[in-house]
Image (cartoon, helix red, strand yellow):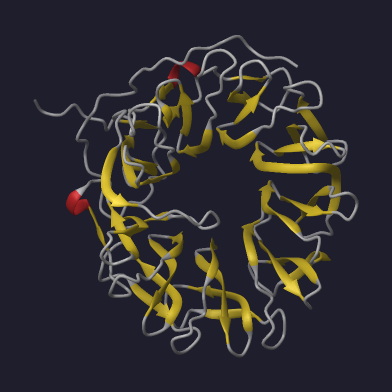
């Protein structure tokens, strides 16, 4: 085991605060931008209560008109809102889909081009598929898939090949795989994978490195199957296991390979498996437990406990072969484990939280080799922990939360270099902390949720522009 010495993070401002040149209306991404910069260390409260209490569904997504999300203003319940990153008129209700205090409970925000699809409930059609371009006029129900007030309850929304794929139910076919181009005529069921009214309930939709769409379905109430849908053709089975064992999610694509984890009958062990282009899957390792997984360069970086020591987790990597599935570094020697967590890749470097037994839980980085797996910084000096969480890459920056003495869990940002890692302004001053999470860019802002001083979770925006666009404001 190896680690570096104590590193004190420099709290340096990244650029001058500015008003900036407004990003063109409708620009949700900037593919020609090579570099970005944040224009202030102080995020602005947008004055709304963000609802992000469903861990399996994205709480917001960027549209042509701004970031779309769920908020509750106490008068209309949970409804869809939109924000350009400015408080006041820049953050507003889109449509009151279910008038009154009940709310339409919008969920599963998924961007497809400049539009955002989501599931919501209205009093006419029940819970159905909706779409918005970020304007009130452009927010509408796509189709009444299950006619009447029952609703088809769309979920597992996923963008693939410029279309929306999702799961929905009908009285004739049960819950099956659908796709939509945003029109009623273009919203169709793909296949009745479990014939009749029985549900195949497609879930965990993932784009493989081979360009195909992979997903998991139920079969005959006995099996769980991994399916592959190519750009053309019908879904085909890749792998199956029994329902009582099942899969561990999510699945991760690396190059042409798709990695996934299945549970085994023996003593709770799990198997790391891989398929290449839909070929029969092979097991590349048996573990006591597998945690976070992420693609790094041309291999899978993952957290695992070897053998049956399910608590002794360390950092591993796999190239999709048995011989190439190896421990990267035993960060905390012995049978305790460093418990790596919150994996995120910035450029070619993996960042994660881990505990080496000396510095507490702190940020680490790795290039996938033992010699360059090291303590990135001891944010809470000594054996205390800063507990880095919510590590998220936005363009060429790493956003995360960390807890240092006197500040609590607050937002931080890094350009991947120790001296370029800074704490943002406290949102809940004092030791309580704001617990920020869900960092995501729309236009020229990075949005995230955090708790204010009263403990209310609100939506915040940090000015974030293409490099050189942070202009000095007029005096």
In the displayed structure image, the side of residue 5 where residue 277 appears, left or right: right
In the displayed structure image, the side of residue 378 where residue 244 appears, left or right: right
Q: Which image quarter holds the C terminus?
A: top left
Where does residue 204 sit, x and y in percent of width and height? 64, 61
222, above or below 300, in the image = below
Where does residue 112 sit, x and y in percent of width and height? 45, 62
What residue sits 69% from the left and 88% below the top? 196
* Front one among 70 and 294: 70
What residue sits 18% from the left and 26% below the top? 472
292, above or below 200, in the image = above
Where does residue 260 sit, x and y in percent of width and height? 74, 52
* Front one among 401 and 281: 401
The reply to whether residue 350 is visible in this rendering is no
What residue sits 81% from the left and 22% below the top? 334
Where does residue 416 sit, x and y in percent of width and height? 51, 25
What residue sits 87% from the left and 38% below the top? 307
Q: Where is residue 378, by image quadrant?
A: top right
* Front one among 61 and 426: 426
In the displayed structure image, the side of residue 443 where residue 379 appears, left or right: right
């Amino acid at each position: 085991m190896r680690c570096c010495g104590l590193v004190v993070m420099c709290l340096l401002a990244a650029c001058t605060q500015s008003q900036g040149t407004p990003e063109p209306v409708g620009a949700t991404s900037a593919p020609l931008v090579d570099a970005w910069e944040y224009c202030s260390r102080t995020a602005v409260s947008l004055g709304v209560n963000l609802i992000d209490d469903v861990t399996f569904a994205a709480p917001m997504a960027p549209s042509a008109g701004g970031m779309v999300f769920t908020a509750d203003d106490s008068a209309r319940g949970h409804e869809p809102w939109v924000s350009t990153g400015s408080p006041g008129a820049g953050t507003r209700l889109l449509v009151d889909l279910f008038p009154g205090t009940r709310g339409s409970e919008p969920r599963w925000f998924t961007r497809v081009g400049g539009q955002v699809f989501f599931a919501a409930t209205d009093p006419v059609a029940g819970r159905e598929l909706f779409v918005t371009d970020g304007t009130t006029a452009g927010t509408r129900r796509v189709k009444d898939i299950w006619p009447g007030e029952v609703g088809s309850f769309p979920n597992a929304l996923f963008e693939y090949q410029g279309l929306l794929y999702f799961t929905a139910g009908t009285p004739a076919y049960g819950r099956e795989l659908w796709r939509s181009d945003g029109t009623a005529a273009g919203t169709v069921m793909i296949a009745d994978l479990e014939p009749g009214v029985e549900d195949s309930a497609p879930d965990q939709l993932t784009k493989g490195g081979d360009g195909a769409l992979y997903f998991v379905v139920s079969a005959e109430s006995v099996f769980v199957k991994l399916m592959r849908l190519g750009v053309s053709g019908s879904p085909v089975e890749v792998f199956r296991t029994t329902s009582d064992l099942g899969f561990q999610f999510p699945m991760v694509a690396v190059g042409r390979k798709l990695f996934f984890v299945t549970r085994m009958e023996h003593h709770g062990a799990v198997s790391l498996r891989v398929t290449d282009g839909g070929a029969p899957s092979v097991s590349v390792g048996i573990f006591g437990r597998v945690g976070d997984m992420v693609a790094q360069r041309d291999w899978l970086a993952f957290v695992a406990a070897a053998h049956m020591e399910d608590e002794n987790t360390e950092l591993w990597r796999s190239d999709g072969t048995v011989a190439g599935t190896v421990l990267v570094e035993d960060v905390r020697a012995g049978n305790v484990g460093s418990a790596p967590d919150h994996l995120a890749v910035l450029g070619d470097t993996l960042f994660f939280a881990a505990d080496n037994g000396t510095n507490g839980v702190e940020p680490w980085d790795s290039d996938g080799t033992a010699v360059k797996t090291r303590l990135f910084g001891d944010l809470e000096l000594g054996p205390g922990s800063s507990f880095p969480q919510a590590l998220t890459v936005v363009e060429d920056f790493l956003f995360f939360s960390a807890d240092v003495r006197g500040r609590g869990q607050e937002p931080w940002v890094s350009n991947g270099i120790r001296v370029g890692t800074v704490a943002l302004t406290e949102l809940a001053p004092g030791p309580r902390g704001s617990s920020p999470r869900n960092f995501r860019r729309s236009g020229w802002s990075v949005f995230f949720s955090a708790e204010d001083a009263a403990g209310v979770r609100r939506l915040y925006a940090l000015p974030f522009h293409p490099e050189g666009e942070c202009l000095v404001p007029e005096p």
